[in-house]
Image (cartoon, rainbow, N blue to C red):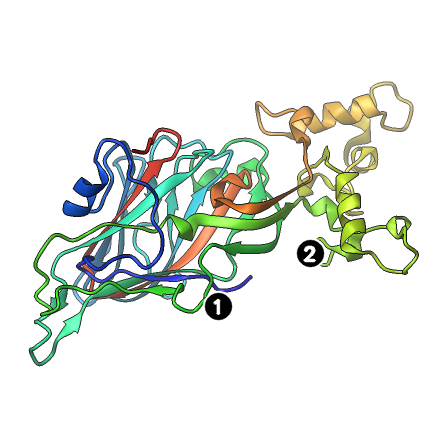
Amino acid sequence: MKKVALFGLPLLLVAALVFGVLPAIAGKPQKAIEMSNGMPSGDHQNLLFHGKDASVFNCIECDPSIEGCNVVNIHEYGTAPITYVSGRKVNIPGLTVFDSCAGFDGPDDSAEIWIPYEPEGYYVYARALGKPAKKDSLSEGYQPRSIIFQNTENSPSIYSLFGEGTEPGDVELMLPLGLIASNGDFIYDSSVEGGNLVRFDSQPDGKGRGKSQGKDITNMFMWTGCVYQPILDTNEDGVVDENDVPSSYDTDGTLGISSEEFQSWLNDNPEGYVYPESFDMNGDGEVNEMDVEHCCLGTYDTDSSGIIESDEFVVWVNDNLPSGTTIEDLLVPLWACYDNPVWVFSIADLVYQNQVVINDGIKNLQLRFYPVATTTFN
């Protein structure tokens, strides 16, 4: 996957945005948004980043079980990884930060930000607060403050879940099954000159008078590509492509699979039963009656026939799934392609979007997530 856009957010955001923004959200007219703080009005999930001096700040993790956690602490100057988590089976009442100290225990010390699932996604706005720079632009030692968010090349990571998750500790219990994302990209692509780094300047004299403006960064979360269940990766090379297609689909006799023949194979396999990897008891790469015979024939061979019948297999599967899940929940679409950009967390049960934050002096940053479904436009 290509490395995607960088968004630079200097402290005072008063210059015009160089890419298109979404229409104004009802409740605060466009002119009022432009003249106030640049943020829409309405219900939203709120996330805060606090830049801290690592030489004096003792970062203590927020405990979501005893208090509301919506703050990520990062170095005032430095780099830290963060991960946004959501998906079709993420059941959490409000935005919650787990591991709220990012980068304080090394470069791989990531914060996890869990976002309530919204099928249509959110509009995302960012706003930096505080002084725009150290000294003004005419003074010696002038140093503008900025912050950059960058989606990483290994993003997104996507999974099927057999059950619902409400916190990181639930994921293993939900028997996650890794999915394959192919030809994926976010809207902002680093190969597009001028689109990968957006800078905003403070006042011309560098003194930063005026209100700090919010900016629309929704496109960092909008994705195109295809999602495949691993059962379609028949040659187990980690991708789903023409090399997975049986030769019987070579209808033109070219001794190769064309893109049209590949699509024909996909169309013939729209859905199927997908089982947790842990159900492959005999390690043959498939989940079927033979796995029950391998692990527990005596328990599930209720008719003493010496083999496991299909009805006995179903009982075994249901007994080993998380509570509230049955074998019928395992009949799922095997693939989906998104030619038009979609909210990245809508593509799978569990989605991890990995980013790197590069902070150069920002002490306070707001991110707000406005649900698309409940937001109307003027």
Amino acid type of the residue that numbered disc 1 sits on in the rendered structure: Ser
Q: Where is the N terminus found, in terms of image quarters?
A: bottom right
Q: Say whether residue 187 is visible.
A: yes
Q: Relative to residue 286, is residue 75 depicted above or below?
A: below
Task: Look at mark 2 in the image and give the residue it sits on.
Answer: 239
User: Going 69% across and 56% down the picture, which residue do you hit?
Assistant: 239
Report the side of 74 relative to 185 (left or right). Answer: left
Q: What kind of element bears circle 1? A: loop
Residue situated in front as seen by the camera: 244 or 66 = 244
Where's residue 127, x and y in %?
23, 51
Residue situated in front as seen by the camera: 355 or 34 = 34
Residue situated in front as seen by the camera: 65 or 354 = 354
Where's residue 274, x and y in %?
70, 37
Outermost residue, top direction? 303
Task: Look at mark 1 in the image and give the residue it sits on.
Answer: 191
User: Going 67% across and 31% down the picture, which residue do you hit?
Assistant: 330
Structural crowding at the residue carrying mark 2, measured as other residues with C-alpha within 10 Å and reported as few (<14), some (14–19) or many (≥20) = some
